[in-house]
Image (cartoon, rainbow, N blue to C red):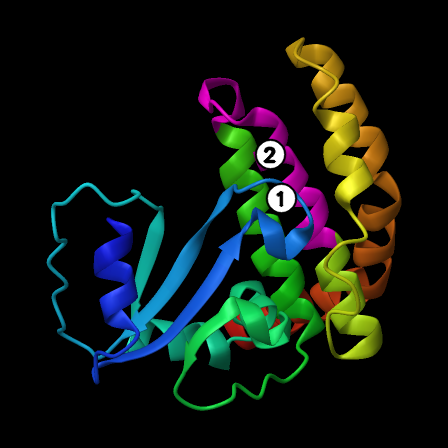
Amino acid sequence: MHKTTLNKLIEHPEVYYIYDLRGAVFGVDNLGEYIVVVKDGLIIEDELDDSEIVKVSIYSSSEWFKLVINGEILPWICACIDKKYILKEYIKLLMTTNPLQLRKCFDTTKNQILSNIEEVELKQFNLWKIILFARFCNQIIENHKIVNFRNSVSDYQELKKYNNFDELLNIFNTLINSELNLLYKSTDELLKQEKITKLQQKK
């Protein structure tokens, strides 16, 4: 989307939320994207001009509030970022902590990224996102909020040192190991209980 179009969405009455989740919010260079939440059925036409082209993900209000209700990680991030990265917010999001849902969301995100990581151009950035999500999940479970967005910059800088794919995966596994152990330790019992409950319901 062209930046001109994005700027005009701030005043659009049927655009409810705009969050700047480019790299600056996490303390790195301009990577990432804008998140835009619009009224169900709204179609946004991009203005083709010579302004900057930015990456934008658009959610309908129904899609967004389904994520909120499910306690998924993306609305948590948007609810906790510094105000200067919130370009528009119709009403403040109030999130509830659901450790098991966060674990499932993290596992899904991790598997999606790793399934095609060899073909992804920004390998280091996408592996870093997995580390970031794991750390955020642990912070939410422990503190009911994201405490610090910028405490993972050193991880990103470390990943950027490696271009060889095998070396990159090795350092990624080293960097994420402690966060994974913490996340799984706090949610494994919940996951086990959920599986037992489902089995009992089938009987």
Q: Residue at x 49, y 46 (%)?
A: 32
Q: Is residue 130 in view from this perspective? A: yes
Q: Which residue is drawn at 67% across and 60% down?
A: 103
Residue 121 is covered by the magenta coloring? yes
User: Which one is in front, 150 or 51?
Assistant: 51
Q: Name the residue under label 1.
A: 129
Answer few, some or many: residues within 10 Å of disc 2's Cα (few below 14, many 20 plus, some between 14 and 19): some
- The single residue placed furthest to the top in the displayed view is 164
Q: Which residue is drawn at 84% across and 73% down?
A: 142
Q: Quadrant of the C terminus?
A: bottom right
Q: Is mark 2 in CB contact (under 8 Å) with mark 1?
A: yes
Task: Please identify the quarter of the rendering in which residue 13 is found.
Answer: bottom left
Q: Where is residue 22 in the image (x, y as percent from the top left)?
A: 51, 51
The three-letter amino acid code for the residue at tag 1 is Lys
User: Which one is in front, 41 or 147?
Assistant: 147
Q: In this view, does 107 lie above or below 101?
A: above
Q: In this view, does 41 lie above or below 3?
A: below
The magenta stretch is 116-134
Q: Name the residue under label 2.
A: 125
